[in-house]
Amino acid sequence: MTSPYETIEVRPVGGALGAEIHGVDLSLDLPDRQFSEIREVFRDNGVIFFRDQKLTPEQHIAFAERWAPININRFFTHVEGHPKIALVLKEPDQKRNIGGGWHTDHTYDIEPAMGSILYAHEVPQSGGDTMFASMYAAYETLSDGLKQTLNGLRARHSSRHIFGPARAGRKDDTVGRIKNPELANQDAVHPVVITHPLSGRKSLYVNPSFTLGFEGWTDVESKPLLDYLYAHASQPSFTCQFQWQPGSIAFWDNRATWHLAVNDYQGQRRLMHRITVAGTALH
């Protein structure tokens, strides 16, 4: 079978989403043709992966800025000297990880992030994988009746309950890795079903971490339908799982996927650098 790509090799990871891209050195200024092909794979697969990369922080930033301006995370500790890069770290003596539940980054913002580029520096000998779920597949497999209902709804999202002052009161070991609780003061309303600006496909746009309920509904009224959608969207046939190695990169599309960092590596260190790239209002 002839590959549709001239400058890269693409290997699917899961049936619903995900592709590894080979034959690329992200430390270089990529030719326009190669960058265009990478963009196509990103559009079609929701999350793309690269192996064996060696990037300085400056090169990581340069690759991210090729896509869009960087959205600096208000709550993560940043890499020293590089405020555009969030530090995603779990030390051997820490029990809780960051991102351990299904979520989509920055849905609490009026203009949510387009995507995030996570670069592995140190990984456990085993465990520490990241799972991804396709929100294209989640929407497309719903009944016509439920699609019709959801297409008319908007949902309320917030960061207050995740990153706000209540977090410091929990006294768990994410305190210190997550900061600025006073900045968790933003809320946003987005369509429950969005049309992806690159692919034109419809995607489910609610998530268990940041979605509070439907606009015009109470949280209690919203919960049964949201719980159904969450269970539906996270079924194994809609997911893929990525096993990290030092030098691996995952770049996921926040408008088409969820992700979850598996916390199964107690007593081991995991050090990642994350850059989030800006998006636009969703429709």
Image: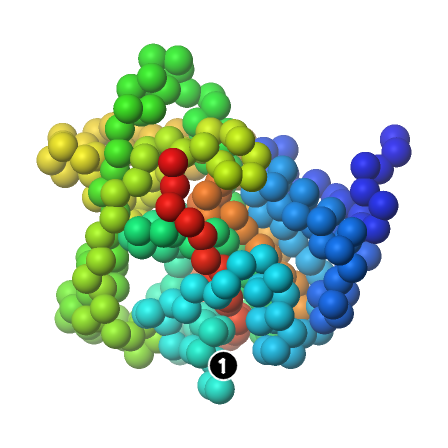
Q: Quadrant of the C terminus?
A: top left
Residue 200, given in percent of the width and then of the height, sits at 53, 31
Q: Total marks drawn?
A: 1
Kindly identify the residue that appears in the image at 15 percent across and 65 percent down. 166
Above or below, 229 against 149 in this view is below
Q: Residue furthest top?
A: 145
Q: Is residue 28 left or right of residue 204?
A: right
Q: Is residue 173 visible?
A: no
Toward the viewer: 211 or 128? 211
- Does residue 7 appear left or right of residue 46 in this picture? right
The image quadrant where one finds the N terminus is: top right
Question: Foreground: 230 or 33?
Answer: 33
Q: Say if 191 sits above or below 263 in the image.
A: above
Residue 218 can be seen, yes or no? yes
Q: Residue at x 65, y 74 (%)?
A: 59
Query: Of the residues shown, which amino acid type is indicated by label 1?
Result: His
Q: Secondary structure at mark 1?
A: strand
**Residue placed furthest toward the right:** 2
Which x, y percent locates residue 247?
A: 67, 68
Find disc 1 in the rendering and name its residue: 82
Is 85 in front, or is 163?
85
On the rendered structure, is 164 left or right of 263? left
Q: Residue at x 67, y 43 (%)?
A: 41
Residue shown at 58% from the left, 57% from the top = 67
Q: Is residue 196 above or below residue 54?
A: above
**Coordinates of residue 114 in the picture (x, y in percent):** 47, 51
Q: How is the image coloured?
A: rainbow
Measured as percent of width and height from the top left, residue 17 is found at: 59, 38
How many other residues sit within 10 Å of disc 1, few (<14), some (14-19) or many (≥20)?
Answer: few
